[in-house]
Each structure stands twice: as C-alpha cells, then as structure tokens.
Amino acid sequence: MSKENFMNTYGKFDVVFEKGYGTKLYDVNGVEYLDFVSGVAVNCLGHSHPAIVEALNEQSKNLMHVSNIYWNTKQIELAKKLTDHGEHDKVFFCNSGTEAVETALKLARKYGKINGGDNKNEIIFMENSFHGRTAGALAVTGQIKYQKDFMPLMPGVKSAKFNDIQDFKSKINENTCAVILEPVQGEGGILPAEVDFLKAVRDLCDEYDALLIYDEVQCGIGRLGSLFGYQSFGVVPDIICLSKGLGGGFPIGATLAKEKAAKAFAPGDHGCTFGGNPLASTVALTVLKELMDKGIIESVNEKSQYIIEKIKVLKDKYDIIEGVQGKGLLLGLKVKTDPKKILDKCFENKLMLISAGKDVIRILPPLNVTKEEIDAAIDILDKSLQEILV
Ligand SMILES: *Cc1c(COP(=O)(O)O)cnc(C)c1O
C-alpha cells in the first residue's frame, strides 16, 4: 500500500482500517480492535450507527450541498435544536473545531472594536490549552511545542495560568475583548476547570466587558454528561465552540453565541462554504436526537463512575498508575511512565487508546458504550500492564 505520498504530519500507528461498527474497528486483514479513542471524541455513537447511516442515505438523495447564501431546512432545524437546549441565541456553522475557534476569535475582536474601540482587542488564553492548528487558534494554544516553528503568530494575545484566579486577575484589563478556555483541557492532559475559577473568570469578564469563550470541541455534546460542557459546571459562557462529537464522524463545527456577542457580526464579516450543509446538518440532527432521546447523555456519568471504580482496582494492583482524572467520558489515566509503552502494548492486544499531555492516557469510548465493552477494555488494559511489567 502506498503511504509515501503523504505529508509527514502524524505519528501514526501501523494499521490501515477498513470498517467499523459500534465500538469495533476492523483493519484490512479483518483484525478486530476495540476502539476507546472514538476518533478523538468524535464517534460519540460508535462507528456506522444505523440512524446515522440511514440519515446520510436519505438526505443524500435529496440535497447534499447548497450555498450559505440560501437557507436550507436541515440547517434551520439544527440551529433551532442547538439554541433550544441551551442558553445561546445564535449559531454559525463550519466544518471543524479550529474553524469554530477562529469564528469565536473573530467575533470577539469585532465585539471589542464596537464596544471599546480599536484597543479593545486582546484575547487571554490558558497555559496548557489546545484550540486548534490554524493560525489564529494556534496563537491562543498554550503549548509551545505546537507553536515554536510557526512564529510569528497572531498578536494581541496573552496567556494566564489555568485555575489560578490571582494570575487571571492580573492579566485581564479594559483592553481584553475575550477569554478562551476549555472547561476540561483535553490535549493538555484531561484537566477540568475548577468551578470557583470559572465563576471568577465570568465575573471579571463581566466587569471588563470581555466575552467568555468556552472551547467545548472535545468536552461538549454529551461527553461530560450534559449536552453542553458548561452545563456540568453551571457557569455560562458568551460563546461556545463545538465540533468533534457534533457530527458523530461527519465533519461539522458550530459556534454558538449569546445575542449580545453575535450581533457584532454583519454580512461579509465571516463565512464558510461548506459550513452546516444539508448533509452535515442532517447527521448532526440525528446525533443530537439519538443522544438526547435515547437517554445516552443521562447514562454518561454512571458509565464514568463504573470506569473510575475499575481503574481504582487497577491502581491498587499497579504502582505505575497514579490515578484517574477528568469528567464524564472524558477520562484520563495518569501514569508514572511514558504512556506510549502502555498505548503500544494495548494496541498489540487490540485495544485503542491515546495519550494526552505527557503522562496521561485518555479513555474516550463512544457515549453509547456498554458495561460489557468497558469490562473488555479494562481487561485488556490490565493484561497489557501486566505484560509491560514482567
Ligand atoms: C480537537 C480540538 C480542536 C481542533 O479541532 P479540529 O477539528 O481538529 O480543527 C480545538 N479545540 C479542542 C479543545 C480540541 O480538542
């Protein structure tokens, strides 16, 4: 198989996948893998979910794409669903997480300009954060390893320490137009924000008329046990960035905003050719219906607790496990060794997991995962740890 004509941008596992159903993936040789990566929090209903397959099939017979200079029924329905179930008034559709972040950053700059003049353009981001790979999103990503070879980045941004109220207080001022943070830092190591920190950030944003942006690209859409991530913390942002789980495997992103922020945009300020096209919108609608109407979101915290209990047992057995962190089905297993060794061994034993930060293994099953599948994954993890230690 020809692999030499790819740009060298990923450290890949040596496998070529062909099919997937539910939590199972099959490579070109028919070997079965248990998928606890879910395309990095994307396949929230597992692979080839029948409702998604049917929705795609049906919609593709009628309308796949039409420009955003016209309305389409499915996109209207999706925007209504997203705004009906939360506290945000307006939606902008795009295709990916980084685009949802770019939209939020541009909206924040325009909001600042209108409400505070040309100097109100500064955006505060958190250390250790991840917001995407495009130039703007990269500039507010608080990890130098992603940025160092691409300087100079977008100016007018500065970092604050995550979960450090005093530090944040010293950074925000009247020139701040927005603050962006992940309610649970994903790539950085599955680190949840503290509610007191979010409250303090919210209050200071109000005091300085800065917009609070939550990047829920990884932690949104049911992953924390609530439709939106903020609902698990009780501190409401002005803008939410969504993507990953929203399409359950079909590319779509969305930026939600309160009217106060959204009204800064005027025709021509922003756009996206494919954003929320009828095919993507239909899939996202199906994903939301399945997650909300079948009790899947309500089941997340119970499954989370089940995994946490199982990991506590492993922690007693293996000294290299430091503990488990995170929220809902965005969990991280903190280890005292290079996670790669464990990931590779699990992969050899046909369990897919990925790392986060430098010492965390992410556990990201689909939200409709069963207890039997969790048992199977924990058994493979147990076996793999045992094999590493002998
Ligand atoms: C994955 C991710 C992004 C980037 O999403 P892409 O679809 O890869 O552009 C942004 N923010 C967070 C929190 C993410 O986890």
Image (cartoon, rainbow, N blue to C red):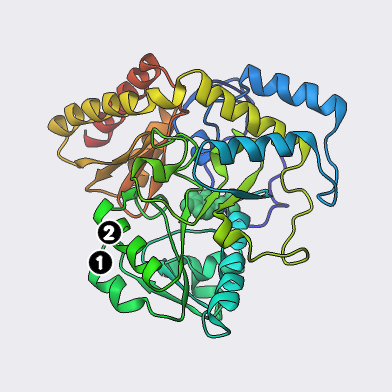
**What SS does tag 2 mark?**
helix
Q: CA distance from mark 2 to mark 1?
A: 6 Å
* Residue 4 relative to residue 143: left or right: right
Residue 101: tell me if it is visible.
no
Residue 165's disc number: 1
* Residue 320 relative to residue 276: left or right: left
Residue lying at 63% horizontally and 66% vertically, measured from the top left:
264
Residue lying at 64% horizontally and 34% vertically, measured from the top left:
284
Residue 337's disc number: none
* Residue 167 relative to residue 78: left or right: left
Disc 2 vs disc 1: Cβ atoms closer than 8 Å? yes
Q: Residues within 10 Å of mark 1 (few under 14, many from 20)?
A: some
Given residues 284 and 334, the one toward you in this image is 284
Q: What quarter of the picture does the C terminus occupy?
A: top left
Residue 210: tell me if it is visible.
yes
The amino acid sitting under disc 2 is Phe
Q: Measured from the top left, where is residue 240 in percent x and y? A: 51, 52
The amino acid sitting under disc 1 is Ile
Residue behind mark 2: 197
